[in-house]
Image (cartoon, rainbow, N blue to C red):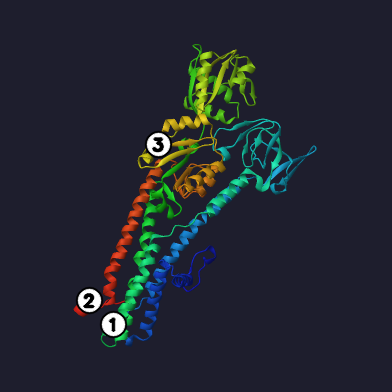
Amino acid sequence: MELGGVCTVHSCGVLCDLDVFERAGRSIITWRLNMFTLIGVGSGVAWLFSVLALLLPGIFPDQFKTHAGTVYVYFEAATVILTLVLLGQLLEARAHGKTNSAIKELLKLAPNSATKIVGNQESTLSIEDIQKGDLLRVKPGEKIPVDGSIKVGAATIDESMISGEPIAVDKQAGDKVSAGTINGNKTFTMLAEKVGADTLLSQIIEMVHTASRSKAPIQKLADKISGYFVPIVVVIALIAFTIWAIYGPDPAYVYGFVNAIAVLIIACPCALGLATPMSVMVGVGKGAKSGILIKDAEVLEKMNKIDVLIIDKTGTITEGKPSVEKMVSTSAQYAEKEMLQMIVALNSHSEHPLAEATLKYGKEKAVQAKAVDKFEAVTGKGVIGEYEGQSLALGNEKLMEQVGAVIAAGLLKQVTDEQKQGKTVSYLAVGNAAVGYIVISDKIKQTSAEAIHRLQEEGMEVIMFTGDNEATAKAVSDTLHLNGYKAQMLPENKLEEIKRLQAQGKKVAMAGDGINDAPALAQADIGIAMGTGTGVAIESAAITLVKGDLNGIAKARLLSHKVMRNIKENLWFALGYNVLGIPIAAGVLYPFFSVLLSP
């Protein structure tokens, strides 16, 4: 950028130096005085004084001259003030521009093309050309192009984009599927039912856009102070000029003019203008060192006032990926290690996401996968095969019925109790009897309980919103002693609930990690993204916790408190030196000590 009235980033919404004076002029005309009033008046007067001193140095009294007979000029001071103001505006504009990045990330979730079926022929067409009622083929690993329902086939769909839950969902013919979600390892045919702006993904994009635009910028504390400070300074400058013009020595009007200018220049908000950005700069740097990335400086002001924290479950409270919680053998014939050997052998042939969790667990326990014959994946139920001459079945109760495996009453009760807590449980049957089970869940992070307790002690309500079922949500809430929870929440539900809390006058922060959290993160007074989450969530949030640790929220709150206290101390210091300096600049010491303060 340049300081000669031309600004290379003007099209981005950043002020150039002429705009500073235009805003200062408008603030005086409308009498809505702010920081720009002080900057415009102070730097403008300093520049005009300097021009006069350069061209007509002889009209100034000796008290304002150097030993060489020249008068001090303030061109560089005016330039520095304007440069700092423009730099602050540039940083602010860049921060606000991040909203568009979130929307771009969301747009990347939709595929560019789809495979359409007409008769026995398949053709590739653009997403924009898909019509309601079209028959589409979705191949393994592809993103689903539009909202609709499965017509032929079955699939395992990763719906974490919508629900936030890491465990993939089994879908059969007639089940609904959503644009942007990811197909597993099977091909299926779907019927397009919602296209274009009607798809759920498009609605999420619009929600993020609307929520981001709806935010009003906070009026800066320095502007509030300026509203009172500017008229006081102008009145003092006029009084100083009048007194010097009437009672001052010759040339009285020059003395009056120079001292009035000195008052206006000393009041130019160098310290007042830097009080906030300097503290914010240090605060943002301290936050980064602690793994707290702060996108918008206003966050440091808002964070100290938050009284409700909304947290997502998966990836925020929990680790965000399915893992084996435990394995239980109910048969004296098979030890747990033998059961694990059978499960690893079966799942080594499976491509289901839950199989990956068991294989990882087996690797941790140093279990090697052995050969399995006659392997078969039974959609929606589990897997079967032969292992060392024995028939094995791993899956849900329906699979046990299919293979004729008997489930003992005690085993059934244990599994039912686990399922009531929202955990995924698979029976293992050997021959015609179920011999145990394996529990897969999303573990709570070790730091979550400590962080939530710490925030609650500071008077903050902590409420969980999750797309998971009621049983799981209640189990997590009870374990962590949360202030409340809501289960089976879709992106629009989270957004509306935050709006409802804000309508009650609550200051709301939202912490999440998924695409489904993006609208809520944008709507909240402060959006907090887990650094381990999706790019969309990070772009939609004002704070990113690099380590994905909720303790970072408590640290951010403490940082906010300290930064705000420092800003207020800086502002009081700036005002204090003005209270002392303005009377001296006006010439109050001259009658007693013949001392004048040079502009």
Q: Amino acid at mark 1?
A: Trp
Question: How far apart, in angstroms, are the residues tagged by discs 1 and 3?
Answer: 68 Å
Upstream in the sequence, badge 1 or badge 2?
A: 1
Residue 485 image point, x, y percent: 48, 36
Question: How far apart, in angstroms, are the residues tagged by discs 1 and 2?
Answer: 13 Å
Q: Residues within 10 Å of mark 2 (few under 14, many from 20)?
A: some
Residue receiving disc 2: 589
Residue 425 vertical position relative to residue 246 in the rendered view, above or below: above
Q: Amino acid at mark 3?
A: Thr
SS at badge 2? loop
For the view shown, which residue lies furthest in the top direction? 333
Residue receiving disc 1: 244
SS at badge 3? loop
Q: Is residue 554 toward the left or the right of residue 353 in the image?
A: left
Q: Quadrant of residue 586?
A: bottom left
Upstream in the sequence, badge 3 or badge 2?
A: 3
Q: Amino acid at mark 2?
A: Leu
The one nearer the camera, 349 or 320, is: 320
Residue receiving disc 3: 447
